[in-house]
Amino acid sequence: MKAQIYNIKAEKVEEMSLPKEIFDTKISEKLISQAIRVYLANQRSSFAKAKTRSEVAGTRQKVWAQKGTGRARHGNRTAPIFVGGGSAMGPDGKQNYSLRLSKKMKVVALNSVLTKFAQDKKIIIIDSFKELTPKVKEGIKLLTGLRALDEVLSKSSKVGIITTKTLPNVKRAFGNVPKTNLLSLKSLNVYDLSNQNFLIISKKTIESFSK
């Protein structure tokens, strides 16, 4: 599997072979789906909270006499069986929605997504972002140049730019460009990758994938 390498002037430099162990693996749609579900579950917070009988407003006076009325015995109106009473087993605001995925499964899921991008020829490599001027117009200029050279990229609405770490000049150049997402190798995940239509990856990042 190969990908084209361009410089920041959108000029073709050379062609690079992508690591087979990452970009040419067996695709597991099931693991991709599971990884996305785990990611979303771990972003979820618990907000639902129902009041118990000790938290609702109301009198604590005994409803009626314990005996002699012919009715069931009761304590007060805050009991769960009364309208306006507390909830018996409602959510307490401490629900735990977190899920886990083994490290090996995460790697397989991540490689599956990257392999799909490689097979669909939706990857372009930039030799280095060091010389990129930290201005939005320079970021747009680079994207426009690359779109003119790559037909698949020209039809892609969401573009993910992956670097080894957050680079200030890249952040300033692409941070405000619509539908362009900056991704870091350290925090790369299946969910963020799956939301992209095309990937622009630095050469250093490709070399770091295997590590």
Image: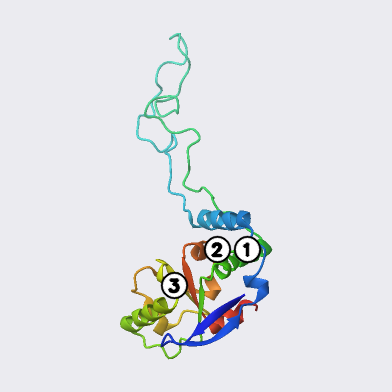
Q: Residue at x 34, y 69 (%)?
A: 178
Q: CA distance from mark 1 to mark 3?
A: 31 Å
The N terminus sits in image quarter: bottom right
Query: What residue sits right under mark 1 in the picture?
Result: 106
Q: Residue 139, percent across and down?
A: 36, 81
**What crowding class fits label 2: few (fewer than 14 Cα within 10 Å), some (14-19), or many (20 or more)?**
many
- Asked if marks 1 and 3 touch (Cβ < 8 Å), the reply is no
* Depth order, front residue of 21/145: 145
Q: Hey, which residue is sitting farthest bottom in the picture?
A: 131
Query: What residue sits right under mark 3 in the picture?
Result: 151
- Asked if marks 1 and 2 touch (Cβ < 8 Å), the reply is yes
Q: CA distance from mark 1 to mark 2?
A: 8 Å
Query: What residue sits right under mark 2 in the picture?
Result: 190
Q: Residue 202, percent across and down?
A: 51, 81
* Disc nearer the start of the sequence (1/3): 1
Q: Residue at x 43, y 48 (%)?
A: 47
Residue 155 position by quadrant:
bottom left
